[in-house]
Image (cartoon, rainbow, N blue to C red):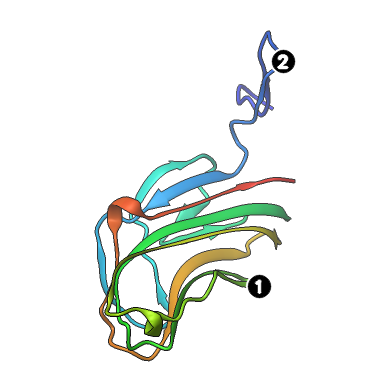
Amino acid sequence: LGTTSHMVIDANGHITKPLQPAFQVQPSSDQNNLSDNTQIAFGTERFDQNGDFASNTFTAPVTGKYLLSFHGRIDDIDSAASWVRAEIITSNQDYKSSIIDPGVFSGDATYWNFSQTVLADMDANDTAIVQFGKSGGADQSDVNQGDTYFSGFLVC
């Protein structure tokens, strides 16, 4: 297979797979005034081991099970909204995080964190994105650049 290392085993038996799909991205700036079904923009790649992440979208290179994880800080959630949540959307399934009812707050939520991890069944060329979902209220919520991440890797 030429000079490309597909699997490396060191003297202690540690195995690395340099071409195994794995990525971690975060926004390159805050994203303001989110409406329902707004796709979260990820402009900074911390790593993209197999080059499968582009244009805010992860594309599975092979069929398998992928661990996908999102952690996001959403600021200024309108207390007039009926509900808000973060969603990992794949070609096969929509994975929706815990839903919150901002109406129980005494005012707008200045800071809120959403975290979600799923083991997603993806076929080759299936895609995954993260989006913000809400019902009602003003479009005033913002994604905080420094505290928002999307990552994933092929498990098996």
Image quadrant in which the N terminus is located: top right
| Whole-percent x, y for residue 86 in the image | 47, 70
- Report the front residue among 54 and 98: 98
The reply to whether residue 93 is visible in this rendering is yes
Which residue bears the numbered disc 1?
93
Q: How dense is the environment of label 1, judged by Cα within 10 Å: few (below 14), some, or many (20 and up)?
A: few
| Whole-percent x, y for residue 43 in the image | 33, 55
Side (left or right) of 73 relative to 126: left
| Whole-percent x, y for residue 152 in the image | 56, 50
Going by the numbered disc 2, the residue's amino acid type is Gly
Q: Is residue 139 above or below residue 150?
A: below
Q: Quadrant of residue 142?
A: bottom left
Q: Quadrant of residue 122?
A: bottom right
Q: Is residue 3 above or below residue 21?
A: above
Q: Which mark is residue 63?
A: none
Q: Which mark is residue 13?
A: 2
| Whole-percent x, y for residue 98 in the image | 54, 71
**Numbered disc 1: secondary structure:** loop
Going by the numbered disc 1, the residue's amino acid type is Gln
**Numbered disc 2: secondary structure:** loop
Task: Name the residue rendered at 54%, 42% in the picture.
Answer: 50
Distance, label 2 to label 1, CA atoms, is 37 Å
Side (left or right) of 57 relative to 142: right
Q: Earlier in the sequence, mark 2 or mark 1?
A: 2
The reply to whether residue 62 is visible in this rendering is no
Task: Name the residue rendered at 75%, 46% in the picture.
Answer: 156
Task: Name the residue rendered at 50%, 46% in the picture.
Answer: 23
